[in-house]
Image: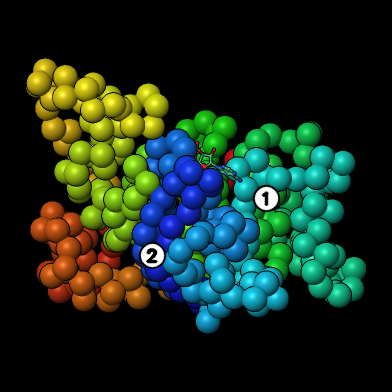
Amino acid sequence: MGIEVKVEGLTKSFGKQQIWQDVSLTLPAGEVSVMLGPSGTGKTVFLKSLIGLLKPERGRVLVDGVDMARSPERDIMEARKLFGLMFQDGAMFGSMNLFDNIAFPLREHTKKKESEIRRIVMERIEVVGLLGAEGKLPGEISGGMRKRAGLARALVLDPQIILCDEPDSGLDPVRTAFISQLLIDLNTKIDATMLIVTHNLDIAATVPDNMGMLFRRNLVTFGPREVLLTSREPVVAQFLTASKTGPIGMSEEKDAAALAAEASGGGGVVEPRALVPQLQPSPGLGERAAVARRRARVLGMLDTLPPSAAAAIRATYGPTGLEPTAVLPRAGGAV
Ligand SMILES: Nc1ncnc2c1ncn2[C@@H]1O[C@H](COP(=O)(O)OP(=O)(O)OP(=O)(O)O)[C@@H](O)[C@H]1O
């Protein structure tokens, strides 16, 4: 099972520019979480801070007893091996074929024999549905295939925590649906803790167990998916309904005057969009191990949640808390 990531009071600036402050949240072990936020709110900076590539000036990121912000670099390097990273563009070496790109972390960080490397790489290539494409160069395949190759590479060191930076960027809605299914299937197969950074509303609505949002240098909220998906908080409802009405403007935030003018013009409150069931694993994979753990966890915290979120959780799990989760149509096949 994946391991928990605990973030406490994290604050990051570049010079005088504060990116976010006092961010605290826990990524529950083995569950899938999404971090939303308008462009430029520091989602990528957050991912890089989790693995200790960027150093926040305050706060802690606790992973298996190591503080990724402050522990000695040797401990951070060791803890980083628990992570698999999938970057926006796949971050492939252009001159290497997919096999060598995916094998790279194994050749770099382990002393495994070539035969063992071949076995692991081909297994991961199969998991992401790229069998047959291993001899191709990154420039010879589609953006969706490059992302899946990036995911395969993130998997070769058997990570317990997987961080995905905008897995949908540059993909059409159909390819995005396939990648969403792939991420849920992956979680089913390896039970890793996953954090996905995205702007994509369909991924946000259907993939995660938990969701958070960064806005105006703060974490607006982080919790079970139902909290954000039923929220009437203006910034959350605006973002999740892709509305022009609300605090988010063309540049990250509208200025106060524009906001006041909009309010006096009767811009109105944006209603949250209808809650849709979470994606289920592809046929034959069984249930995600995270489902039972999450059910127990969120049913135990109902009293602490907003009434709309608590009602949505009760509706999902039924009055006894034992109902199966509702089932959505599945996606499958090649991206
Ligand atoms: N190494 C760095 N040095 C200085 N500023 C940086 C650095 N990395 C990021 N920033 C700044 O931090 C801010 C947040 O950037 P980040 O890429 O994390 O945003 P984001 O929410 O991921 O945006 P998007 O959704 O558009 O990808 C930006 O203003 C960016 O210019």
Picture disc at residue 150? 1
Q: Is residue 180 above or below residue 316?
A: above
The dot on residue 9 is 2
- The residue located at (26%, 42%) in the rendering is 236
Callout 2: SS? strand
Horizontal side of 202 relative to 246 (left or right) equals right
Farthest residue toward the front? 16
Residue 161: x %, y % from top left: 55, 67
Q: In this view, does 264 lie to the left or right of 143?
A: left
- In the rendering, at what x and y percent does residue 169 appear? 54, 36
Residue 266, compared with residue 149, is above or below; it is: above
Q: In this view, does 89 lie above or below 74?
A: above
Task: State which tag comes first along the sequence, 2 or 1.
Answer: 2
User: From the viewer's perspective, is the residue at label 2 or at label 1 nearer?
Assistant: 2
On the image, the x and y values in percent for residue 136 come to 82, 41
Left or right: residue 259 compared with residue 26? left
Q: Is residue 323 left or right of residue 2?
A: left
| For residue 164, above or below residue 320 | above
- Which label belongs to residue 95? none
Q: Which of 260 and 101 is in front in this view?
A: 260
Q: Residue 75 appears in which quarter of the rendering? A: bottom right
Q: What residue type is labelled 1?
A: Gly
Observer-nearest of 236 and 149: 236
Query: CB at mark 2 closer than 8 A to ligand 1?
Result: no
The amino acid on which the numbered mark 2 sits, given as a three-letter code, is: Gly
Q: Can residue 221 be seen in this view?
A: yes
Determine contact: label 2, label 1, CB under 8 Å. no
Disc tally is 2
Quick check: can you spot residue 198?
no
**Callout 1: 10 Å neighbours few (<14), some, many (20+)?**
many
**Disc 1 element:** helix
Q: Nearer the viewer, residue 31 or 12?
A: 12
